[in-house]
Amino acid sequence: MSSDTQIIEEKIVKVNGDTAIKRYSKGRFLGKGGFAKVYEFVCLETKQVTAGKIMEKSALSKARARQKLMSEIKIHRSLHHTNIVRFEHYFEDESNVYIMLELCTNQSLNDLVRRRKRLVELEVQCYLQQVLSALKYMHSHRVIHRDIKLGNIFLSDKMEIKMGDLGLAAKLEFEGERKRTICGTPNYIAPEILEGKNGHSYEVDVWSFGVLMYTMMIGKPPFETNDVKTTYKRIKMNAYTFPDHISISEEARDLISRILVTDPMERPTIDDMLNHAFFTKNPIPKLLPTSTLAVPPSSSYMRQFEKNNLMSTARQFSRGIDEGILMKPPRSSSQTHGDEERKDQGRLTPREIRRTGSRERNDSAGSASGSGSNTKKVATTSAYTVTLDGPSIWVRKWVDYSNKYGLGYMLSNGCAGVFFNDSTKIIGDVQGEHFQYMFRPSPSQDEEIINHSMNAYPAEFQKKVTLLQHFRKHLAITDAINEVQNPITYVKKWLSTQHSMIFRLSNKVVQVYFQDKTELMLCSGTKQVVYIDKTSKITVFPLATAMESGNKEMTKRLRYTKEILTNMLQPAEGKIET
């Protein structure tokens, strides 16, 4: 145990009046919300690992806050269901109140959807069936959750759904009672809560369930806007649509439409939803494989749950994992720009666009298809490595496939890599004989690197190696720099913004490719800034004095880069959403 590990002591008063001490080590930070912070707790005696929800007593000084906390504790500890986070116990010391809860090691549905962008229908069926089981149990005990959302639904180590955070839950004293507190999360709140005239009951959970279903399948909540008041207005007006560019089944569309109705009395009951065709049209797995935390279920897995051997929308969405993800050439840089201009029409949004780019800026509008392009290389290898003293390795081509799997890229030395949605990374060597795999054993630990041969590696890497090979073939270059490194340079972080694509490489190069096809490279090793303008002219400046260079176009882009780079260099690795 490290010297800075904090020990929390629980005083237990026995029946005979004696006092016992139970000690916990407070570990990694898991999350926060409201007045509480959640950490991993390990009991030093039993080694049991739990989630410890900590609330400072100074934040509970008002009687109302204390009453609310005790209500949460009373409700939560009365509930015992496999799909509800298990309440262990609670205790206090001089400074804090501690609620000990079941630890859900696979995070929340919010984390899952953030990684995967949206889920296939079979996954939604599996998860939501468990949510309905928990809700049916809660409602049978006259408890309304009132804060159903992605962030309050967790996944256990067995991939079981666990409903959590009962901070806004309410228990009805008698059937027919109406609650009148205005509470909830803006995107999920039911219209009758906002109106506040006639009170609300179990139906608010049904509404939030509909929002949850829509969000899991579409990738964003139905009423979401940049302004809370506008979101509330849309909820009251029931103003939402299904985007044309995302295909969902008629059964899913019908169930969501039946749930999201303004009149709470017109919404289906939980049994109505369980008996709806969305949940009965095909067999549903009890639990999903842990691989779906990172990638969609494989087509062979999906096939087990098809009815009459019909290829479902979900299988069409996920079959690429086995059959080849790059059946069609991805959109080029110029096509992407056109798509972004049309996003306000509801046809595409930036997160669904597959971006490609290339250092070969004049090759058929940036096509990365590898065939049929009329490539005209402007910035040659020697110009960077010798004349300009710039980076020896940089990203030559890439394809943003993070709506499914992650970012695939090709480096200037011919090494292909993938930054997966689960923040693991893989990079193959120039010859395609070995690969390097980067991962964090836990969020609090440093990144580890392991090496394997392409001819012999553990079965658990099969899908990721297959994806690497697909990206390698798709983004192939014929004039790679023959520079071999050990460990191999790879993309540590990346960021996609409206105006640029930013890569942070393990060789301490930050590369910024702008939509107007200008480019910056910040080289920590040589303390240089390389700037490539729209005419492909290459200029190099000392990093320390680049802002005073007098090159207005370059300094404007450098200033933009510095503004967003601070976000990119935060401790948590991975794609940064903007």
Image: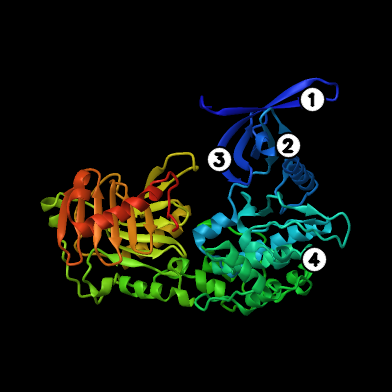
Among the two numbered marks 2 and 3 on one chain, the one whose residue lies closer to the N terminus: 3
Residue type pointed to by label 4 = Asn
To which residue does mark 4 refer? 198
Q: Are marks 4 and 2 in contact (CB under 8 Å)?
A: no
**Disc 4 and disc 2: Cα gap in Å?**
36 Å
| Between discs 3 and 1, the one toward the N terminus | 1
Q: Name the residue under label 3.
A: 29
Residue type indicated by callout 3: Phe
Task: Name which quarter of the figure residue 141 lies in.
Answer: bottom right
Q: In which quarter of the image is the C terminus?
A: bottom left
Q: Nearer the viewer, residue 335 or 316?
A: 335
Left or right of 450? Residue 533 is left
Q: Is residue 375 left or right of residue 107?
A: left
Secondary structure of the residue carrying tag 1 is strand
For the residue labelled by badge 3, is the local secondary structure a helix, a strand or a loop? strand
Secondary structure of residue under mark 2: strand
Mark 1 and mark 2: Cα distance apart in space: 14 Å
Q: Where is residue 430 in the image (x, y as percent from the top left)?
A: 26, 55
**Which residue shows up at 52% across the image and 79% down it?**
244
Find disc 1 in the rendering and name its residue: 13
Instruction: Residue 555: tell me if it is visible.
Output: yes
Tell me which corner region of the image, top left, top right, bottom left or bottom right, holds residue 550: bottom left
**Residue name at image x 59 percent, y 47 percent:** 105
Tag 4: Cα neighbours inside 10 Å, few (<14), some, or many (≥20)?
few
